[in-house]
Amino acid sequence: MALSEKNCSWDDPLSATVESEMTLTKVLRLSLEVLISLFGVVGNILVVIVISHLGKKKRPGDYYLQNLAIADLGTLMMTSPLLIIRLEMPLNWPFGEIACLYLYPVAEIFYGSSVWCIAVIAIERYRKISPVEIYRRNRTPIKIAKRTAALVWVISFLTLCFPLYFVVDYQALSNRSQFCGPIRWTHFLETVYIICLILLTYVIPLAIISFTYIEISRVLRQSINMTRPLKQAHHLAKLQSDKRNYQVNLNSVRLRQNIRAKKILSPLVVIFAVTMLPLNVFRLTMVFWPGFSGQEYFAHLLHVAVVSTIINSAANPVFYSVVSRNFGKRMLNHLLCRNCSFA
C-alpha cells in the first residue's frame, strides 16, 4: 500500500528508511522481470530464426513451435509490460487515449495464443504415437498446420480481446492523471469474463496436455512390453525371419517416437502447470473475494503472478534446446553468429 505524504516526511528517519527499502525492493523486482524478459526475448527470437531457416524441411510441429515463440515474444514485449505499467503507475497511463482503447485490449491475444499453441503441440505429439503406416498416411500437411495456427490466433482474439473493447476506457482525471483499464462493466460481467479466462487459458489446455501425456505414457509402456520379447526372439532367431525383423523394426520405431513424445511433453506439462498456476489462482481469488484488491499484499501477489507468466514464456526456448540437441546446436550457432553472413 502507498504511504501518505503525512507519514513520509524526509524529517522522519524511520519513514525515509522505509521508503528507501520500498524503492530498493521495487528496483530489484523490476530488474528481475526485465532480465527474465530479455532472456526470453533473445531465446524466442532464436527459435523463430532457426525454424525459419528450415525452409521446406519445416514440419507441422515446427510451425506450431514458431507460432508459440511469436506468441511468447508478444507476451514478453507487450502483454506483461503493459500489465506492469498499470500496476506500477495505475493513474499515469503514458501512451495516450488511442493506445488505451485499441492497443491495450489486443495485448491479451499473445497470452491466449501461447497457451493454445502449447495445447496444439501436445495434440500433434499425441498423433505421432499412432502406428507408423497410419501416421504416414494421415500426416498433418503444412497447410493444415498454418490454418490451425491461424485459428488459434483468431479464437484467442475473439474470446480474450474482443470483449475488452466494450469495457476498456481512457479517463483524464482532474489532477493530470490518466487512467486506462476496464471500467464499463458490472461485477457480474467481470466475474463471467475472469471465469472464462481461467477455463480457456488454463483448465481446458492443461486437461488436454495432461491427457496427451497420460496416453503417451500408457502407449509407451505397451510399446516397451511388446518390443522387449520381440527383440529377445529376434536375437534367438538370428535374423532368420524377415517378417519378424520387420515387426521388430516397426515396434522399435514406434518406441522411439513414443519416448521422444513423452520426453517433450514431460517438461511441457510441468512448466505450464506450475508457472501458469499463480496467475489463475490470483484471478480466481479476485472472483470470490471482492475485497482482495484492497489487501496490503495484493500488489506483491500480482507481481508473483506476472513473474510466473514471464518465466513460462522465457522457459520455452530452453526447453526446446534441452529436448532436441540439434535444435539447441542451431540456436547456439545463431547466437554465436557462426552462420551469419556480413556480405
Image: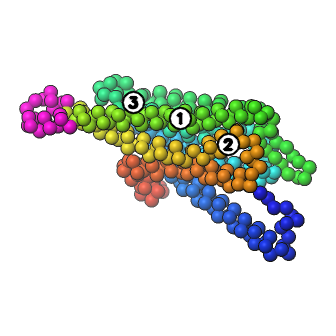
The front one of 35 and 54 is: 35
**CA gap, disc 1 and disc 2:** 20 Å
Question: Can you give x and y, in whole percent of width and height, for residue 109 in the image?
Answer: 63, 38
Q: Earlier in the sequence, mark 1 or mark 2?
A: 1
Which residue appears at 40% of the width and 35% of the height?
214
* Residue picked out by circle 1: 205
Residue type highlighted by circle 2: Thr
* Residue picked out by circle 2: 285
Determine if residue 50 is in view. Answer: no
Which residue appears at 54% of the width and 56% of the height?
39
Residue type highlighted by circle 1: Pro
Q: Secondary structure at mark 1?
A: helix
Residue 282 magenta-highlighted: no
* Residue picked out by circle 3: 127
Determine if residue 201 is in view. Answer: yes
**Residues drawn in magenta:** 228-247
The front one of 69 and 117 is: 117
Q: Residues within 10 Å of mark 3 (few under 14, many from 20)?
A: some
Question: Can you give x and y, in whole percent of width and height, for residue 173 in the image?
Answer: 88, 48
Q: Quadrant of residue 107?
A: top right
Q: Secondary structure at mark 2?
A: helix
**CA gap, disc 3 and disc 1:** 17 Å
Question: Can you give x and y, in whole percent of width and height, for residue 282 in the image?
Answer: 65, 45
Residue 241 magenta-highlighted: yes
Q: Secondary structure at mark 3?
A: helix
